[in-house]
Image (cartoon, rainbow, N blue to C red):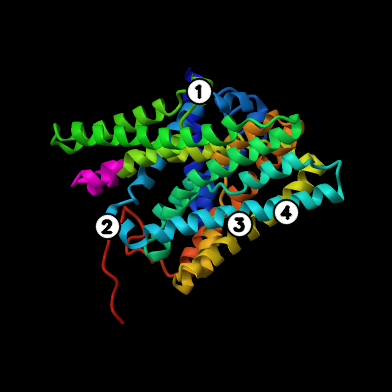
Amino acid sequence: MELYLISLAAALVGGLLMSRVTKLLNLPAVTAYLVAGLLLGPFGLGALKVPGLGFNSLEQVELMSIITQTALGFIAFTIGNEFRLSQLKATGAKAITIGILQAVITTVLVDIVLICLHFCMPNVISVSSAITLGAIASATAPAATLMVVRQYKADGPLTRLLMLVVAIDDAVGLVLFSASFGIATALSSGQVNVTAVVVEPIVEILGSLALGAAIGWLLNLVEQFFHSRSKRLTISVAFVLLATGLSMLEFDIGGVHCSFSLLLVCMMTGTIFCNFCSTSEELMDRVDGWVMPLNVLFFVLSGAELDLNVLSQPVTLLVGVIYILSRSAGKYFGAYGSCRLTRQDKKITDHLGITLLPQAGVALGMALTAASLPDGELVRNVVLFSVLVYELVGPNLTKRSLLAAGEIRPEGRVSSRKENKPAKNN
């Protein structure tokens, strides 16, 4: 136990020290944490097998999954705060349209490109794996996006729309993946499972929304019994932990496998809470400050679990590069076209697609499910490679897009050790 605690301390300190380096390069802190994870992981200092100095194996990193899952729960809870009724009335319908269209366009484009690759090189990738990768391409990582927005205090039409689209993206991606994976399984085995393709995805989405709504309503009810800020913060943290834990439950009812989406459960919890609690904005700000160390650990551990062995596999690199290029084109042009359709401002139309490139935990979870395909190992390795690229490059691209849209503004205070003096007028 003491070695794990020392490793976590090294992860926190290493991530923060690396952020000082990336600040000199004008890169987001998220990139620093991911690089720190790579350096402390089993392919960096962890390879020295010095107890407590980094993570000695991928298995050791996986044992820390309770931390990454908890951090993801808080991230989703915070994103749920974006779904306030006042904001949804203004942009809700357009955000849903954009969220669905860009995901579907990305999936279709990646499907077409990878299926063409199959016909050109049948021994490289099967049709079932091509279809599965197309669905996985629709997923966008909310964590990196949220961290960039929080770090630079970005705000404006693009930022607000981005947070809504990223949240909607999870539900859309879940449906696309379930349907595509069902088709891929049928192509591989010759049997069509209607329950797995149609029923189980709907049950998972509706069940996740219902569970999250119930927890959010209960949180609002219980929170009213406490008046001090510290106790209200504590009860909020307790209910996010409850939502995260319950979302991991799995069971069967009448032959239907029932499970929950952690992101959807926690996002719905945050949505219901922020719309019913009159002081939710102040409380959300306090929760954001409390979970910052948890978020640092989340990204350091995410960097540590990236398997660099995939870089030594030529087939993975070939399919991975094609996947990354086609997915990037799908996200950009999918967002561009859907923004034009919904008559968004030019700044949003030009830059939204770039901010949707980061990909991580949700895609890796889908890839793990796809491992049952005949060449499922290729799917997993391609997703691992793409996550490695997107997580290191994506946050900086998001930052640049928000800067170009004029939604990241210079702060008056450059250090918390110095007094925040107002800027002088020239």
Q: What residue type is labelled 2?
A: Ser
For marks 3 and 1, the one nearer the N-term is: 1
Q: Earlier in the sequence, mark 4 or mark 3?
A: 3
Residue highlighted by disc 4:
112
In the rendered structure, the answer to whether residue 365 lies left or right of residue 155 reads: right
Report whether residue 353 is seen: yes
Q: Relative to the observer, which residue lies in front, 41 or 197?
A: 197
Q: Which amino acid does label 4 sit on?
A: Ile
In space, the residues marked 3 and 1 are separated at their CA atoms by: 43 Å
Q: Position of residue 136 (x, y in %)?
A: 62, 44
Q: Earlier in the sequence, mark 2 or mark 1?
A: 1
Query: Which residue carries the number 3 mark?
Result: 105
Residue 212: image quadrant is top left
Q: Counting residues from the N terminus, which is met first, the one under dot 4 or under dot 1?
A: 1
Give SS at disc 4: helix
Q: What element carries label 2?
A: helix
The percent position of residue 168, horizontal first and vertical second, equals 45, 49
Density class for disc 3 (Cα within 10 Å; few <14, some 14-19, many ≥20) is: many
Residue 185 in the magenta stretch? The answer is no
